[in-house]
Image (cartoon, rainbow, N blue to C red):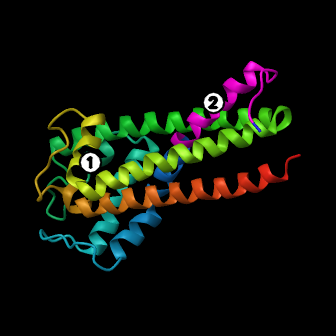
Amino acid sequence: MTDTPSTPKIVVVLGAILTLIYPILTVLIMVRLVMSPLFLQIEYNRSGFPDDYYGFTREDRLTYAPYALDYLINGEPLTYLSDLTFADGSPLYNARELEHMDDVQAVTRAAFLVAILSGLAALAITIYLARMMRNTLIRALRRGAVILLVILVSIIILVIANWDRFFTLFHQLFFAEGTWVFLYSDTLIRLFPEQFWFDAAITIGGLSALVAVITLVITRHRRCALP
């Protein structure tokens, strides 16, 4: 069943908005789930995670990494990180690392704001369409899930073909050129090596794909049940 000329325009517009919101909101929710102490525990304790050649033990990583996470999520001032020191009293982060973390916090705040606003909009639209035009709601969710899966497949192809290129493009999208490149001896790289970000990307993509597939399965049965 498709929209007909008699379908109110507002219903069509709201359905389109929900379709666009679905992939954005789903991915942002998964990003938030990955930004958690649980993911740090799983990642640092998993077999095969690269060691730090400059001396951080797994316990050191589990001690220091949560500070970076708290800084991003809780909106702490930059002094929250700049005051951290090694055992010998030297600063944990250098000036370039602190500048980058400040940039990351700004991006994180913007992303969470988008997630909150889009989540509220999606909830309101879902309630409205569930009462006024359930078929439009189901189609919007299915289309959103399909779009998300297409995007994820495209990203997976890029990641498999050239992870370095994907990693570079992602950072160029959000950060000024050169502000996100660090030495292997810098704390950010020692805590969060490239393998960490690869695993995080796979986890976010996998969870998002799972949600999309579940949405398609549920809405298929709902659609079949409609008269």
Task: Indicate the amino acid at tag 2.
Answer: Ala
Q: How far across and down, in percent of the image, does residue 14 sit?
A: 69, 27
Q: Residue furthest right?
A: 227
Which stretch appears magenta?
2-24
Task: Indicate the amino acid at tag 1.
Answer: Phe
- Between 72 and 51, the one lying in front of the other is 51
- Between 123 and 79, the one lying in front of the other is 123
Q: How far across and down, in percent of the image, does residue 70 sit?
A: 41, 51
Q: How far across and down, in percent of the image, does residue 3 sit?
A: 74, 30
When the figure is inspected, residue 132 is found, relative to residue 196, above or below; the finding is above
- Label 2 secondary element: helix
Q: Which mark is residue 95?
A: none
Residue position for label 1:
166
Residue position for label 2:
16
Task: Quadrant for residue 22, please give it.
Answer: top right
User: Does the magenta run of residues contain 126?
Assistant: no
Residue pictured at 78% horizontal, 34% vertical: 129
Give the label, 2 or 1, closer to the camera.
2
Crowding near the residue tagged with mark 1, few <14, some 14–19, many ≥20 C-alpha atoms within 10 Å: some
59 left or right, relative to 138 = left
- Label 1 secondary element: helix
Q: Earlier in the sequence, mark 2 or mark 1?
A: 2
